[in-house]
Amino acid sequence: MSKETHNGKTRTLRDEARRAKSRIKSGFWSECKEDMGQKMERARENGLNESKAGRYFKTQVEAKINGRQEDEFYLRVKELLTSEGEVSDAIGRLTDKAYYETLTYEEKQRYNLTLSEKYLRALERFRAEYEFEILHKA
């Protein structure tokens, strides 16, 4: 029997089949279809790109199915951006100060570069998702 590791858990094909059957029985897919239709209609009414909206909502459904949790760093970036917008000292605010103080000069440089790359990816993601998040709350 095939085993797949997902989110630190080992699941068999049988486990996945049970989960799929449970989704069908609970009406998950009909709810998703109805919800997706409403969101797509709102996107259309607000003049948003329908194919882009469809891709975004599809990833939301996939995340729900997989039980994917938001990564903590992205949530911190999202909170910063929604509360204060883009700020010039974002990297400084996101830095783990206690950890940073334990690093050598070279390690600090590497940490800053890595943190900057993560921030830019999170910022891109936030920008891509923001217009659809507004629809989700409406």
Image: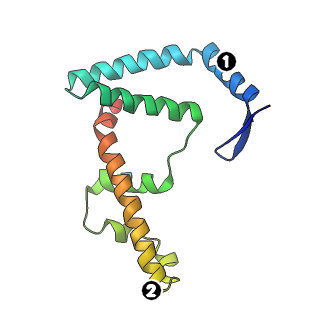
Q: In this view, does 132 lie above or below 20?
A: below
Crowding near the residue tagged with mark 2, few <14, some 14–19, many ≥20 C-alpha atoms within 10 Å: few
User: At which x and y percent is residue 57?
Assistant: 40, 29
Do callouts 1 and 2 mark residues in contact (Cβ within 8 Å)? no
User: At which x and y percent is residue 37?
Assistant: 37, 17
Distance between mark 1 and mark 2 Cα atoms: 54 Å
Q: Residue at x 35, y 31 (%)?
A: 136
- Please give the residue where the numbered disc 2 appears in the rendered image: 105
Q: In which quarter of the image is the C terminus?
A: top left
Q: Which residue lies furthest to the right in this view?
A: 1
Q: Residue furthest bottom?
A: 105
Q: Quadrant of the N terminus?
A: top right
Q: Residue furthest left?
A: 47
Q: Which residue is drawn at 45% across and 16% down?
A: 33
Sequence-first tag of 1 and 2: 1
Look at label 1 and name its amino acid: Lys
